[in-house]
Amino acid sequence: MRALVVTNMYPTPERPAFGRFVQDQVEALRRLPDMDVEVSAFAGGTPAAYLAAARRLRRRYAPGTLEVVHAHFGLSAWPALAAPARIRGVTLHGTDISHPRSRAITLPALRRMDLVAAVSSELAAQVPGWASRTPVRVLPCGVDLYRFRRVDRGQARAAIGVDPARPCLLFPADPTRPEKRHELAAALAARLQVPLLTLGSVAPERVVLYVNAASAVLVTSSREGFGLSVLEALACDVPVLATPHGVAPEALAGVSGTLCAEFDERVWAAALAPHLARADPRVRGRTVAELYSVTVTARTLASTWEELLAGS
């Protein structure tokens, strides 16, 4: 099968973490037998950028060249239409549906797609019935279990330059993103008198050290498209507390030592207390993360493409 992934979020030398989950899925697809996957990534931001991306695709691909064209992020669906293919799909990631302007541009493109997917059931429910010709499927990108794995906590702390003997917490996002609500995690850490680590400018290959260094991971978001950081923590067997958005409710159900609840400083502080009292707090999370591995989710996407091609 020859497929093309079109996306406005993909790692660059300047932004190596941007859209890394899309890159992970592409690499997992390429490892599958009889799968030829190309990528057309471009920087969005202006209408001219999307028009230029469409022109490049129209010039590059002749009819009959591709079997599948799949866009990641709703706005990318429009330039993806310029590449001829037997079937077309799009994966919605969050802001493309939640932001009013992006939503207004994204929704009209969906009826042109043979496959409309969202990275979580919560996000899929935000797509109105009239906007898609078919039911919206849930097709997340998944967690890279090779990159996210259990690392000795003391070694992880030493590697990132924090006290190996002192507990710390991790806010697994860029603090400048308002929907992640860094201020809530910071207030909780201050209440408990525990250092709070953050990501943002951390290189992707070093994120696993920050996850394993933490006594617990705090996902205080007001909304999540998917919430990959929850699965990254589980893949490392690190306790995680998360608001009930994206994948968190289903992923954390039944995992002892985790919490999925709306943010309440007193409740979250109580849930953290036993983890902060232990030298090496861990949970049995990796078996759950395996259900959402990038290998599993790539296979599901490929099977969905095959299903649609058989019926086209």
Image (spheres, rainbow, N blue to C red):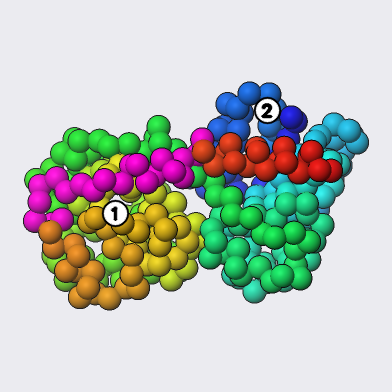
Give the number of the disc on residue 35.
Answer: 2
Q: Residue at x 81, y 34 (%)?
A: 66
Rendering quarter of residue 259: bottom left
Q: Magenta includes 291? A: yes
Give the number of the disc on residue 171.
Answer: none
Q: How far from the left and from the top, in percent, is residue 233?
A: 33, 48
Disc 1 designates what residue? 255
Classify residue 86 as left or right of residue 207: right
The amino acid type found where label 2 is placed reads Met
Q: Magenta includes 276? A: yes
Separation of residues labelled 2 and 1 (CA atoms): 35 Å
Q: Residue at x 57, y 32 (%)?
A: 27
Given residues 209 and 175, the one toward you in this image is 209
Verify CB contact (< 8 Å) between mark 2 and mark 1: no
Rendering quarter of residue 180: bottom left
Q: How far from the left and from the top, in percent, is residue 20?
A: 51, 43
